[in-house]
Amino acid sequence: MPTPSFFPRPHLGGALLALLAFSAFSVFPVAHAQTQAWPASRPISLVVGYPAGGSVDLVARIIAEPLSKRLGTAVIIENVGGAGGTIGAQKVVSANPDGYTLLLGSGSEVSIAKLFNAAVKYNGETDLAPVGLIGVTPMVFVTNTRTGVKTMEEAIAKSRREPNQLSFASSGIGTPLHMSGELINLLAGTTFRHVPYRGAGQQLQDLLGGNIEFSVSVLSSALPHIESGKMIPLGVTTPTRSRAAPQIPALAENPRLKGYDMNVWFGLFGPAKLPAPMVTRLNRELNEVLREEAVWQKLQKAGISNEGGTPQALAAFVRAETQRVRAVVNKAVSTGATN
């Protein structure tokens, strides 16, 4: 076998030969060895920045088991709720990039939080490694049966008759749900006051109990209550109606809300320095999971599209979404909606 060119010539001393050979091999990063062994039998933690029961948690539970099977190791959901998902995101940002801590992220903690809250120290575009876009879903503006409101036009009229008296709930300050309500105020000239909640569960309870008048909810969370008649849907937040609930009008159908377009999206991320081979493997397996019939059916039933695609496409998507909500964020800040 020919001697590789990076080996020292034979006339060099044996001790020096051994030292130089060792040095040559040691330039290979430790991460390479870690990548070769990943994933081992050790479980992978899939961090969700919200309590159990919300839309992000739902998506995590849909993909965790089939992803476990494809990776050959357990994918365990870890709910780290609080601060609009940013506590969970920070946990992943700070994690060792060894492939065993991942984030099931949404627009709230990945792209909106940094714009909205100076206390958020990470940047979702640079401090997380994008793996793949999972899906997109509309939100829905709803009310309870006690308000007597049946349409979005009636809700707008009621807000104008009772300025600053009516409230809308969301799952937290700076979330897409919060931004959706602020966009209604911006376009329709209404004065719905924002009431933030830590998660979807208590938010829906208080709406149904009459403690708040209106709420922005992810469609999948609201549908059971809409179908039971306990909650009145006033409009979905996407430009057109959702295939999961075609009977609900789009808010954009109201002339006062022309051009209205907001959504919730879900993606898989790792820490920023996650090795490229791990990103590639995770992306490949995620795309295969999203093609599985059972997964497709569950996401479609919840009103969530199946997206998939490359890590680069997710990175571009995050950049575009961040820019799209910037004007709404600025409006919310200028009107004191951060309180």
Image (spheres, rainbow, N blue to C red):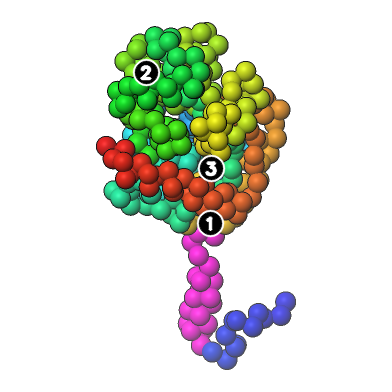
What are the residue bounds of the magenta stretch?
13-34
Instruction: Say which residue label 1 marks.
Output: 275
Q: Earlier in the sequence, mark 2 or mark 1?
A: 2
Q: Which quadrant of the structure image shows residue 8?
A: bottom right
Instruction: Say which residue label 2 marks.
Output: 213
Tell me the distance, in whole angstroms, between the alpha carbons under discs 2 and 1.
48 Å
Tell me the distance, in whole angstroms, between the alpha carbons under discs 3 and 2.
34 Å
Residue 269 shows in this picture: yes
Q: Position of residue 69 (x, y in %)?
A: 62, 33
Instruction: Please state which amino acid type lies under the numbered disc 1.
Output: Pro
Residue 40 shows in this picture: no
SS category of the residue bearing label 2: loop
Instruction: Please state which amino acid type lies under the numbered disc 2.
Output: Glu
Residue 17 colored in magenta in the image = yes
The mark found on residue 268 in the picture is 3
Residue 85 colored in magenta in the image = no
As displayed, is residue 334 above or below residue 230?
Answer: below
Q: Earlier in the sequence, mark 1 or mark 3?
A: 3
Q: Position of residue 199 (x, y in %)?
A: 38, 27
Instruction: Please state which amino acid type lies under the numbered disc 3.
Output: Leu
**Residue in the picture at 59% in, 81% down:** 7
**Residue in the picture at 37% in, 24% down:** 159
Q: Nearer the viewer, mark 2 or mark 1?
A: 2
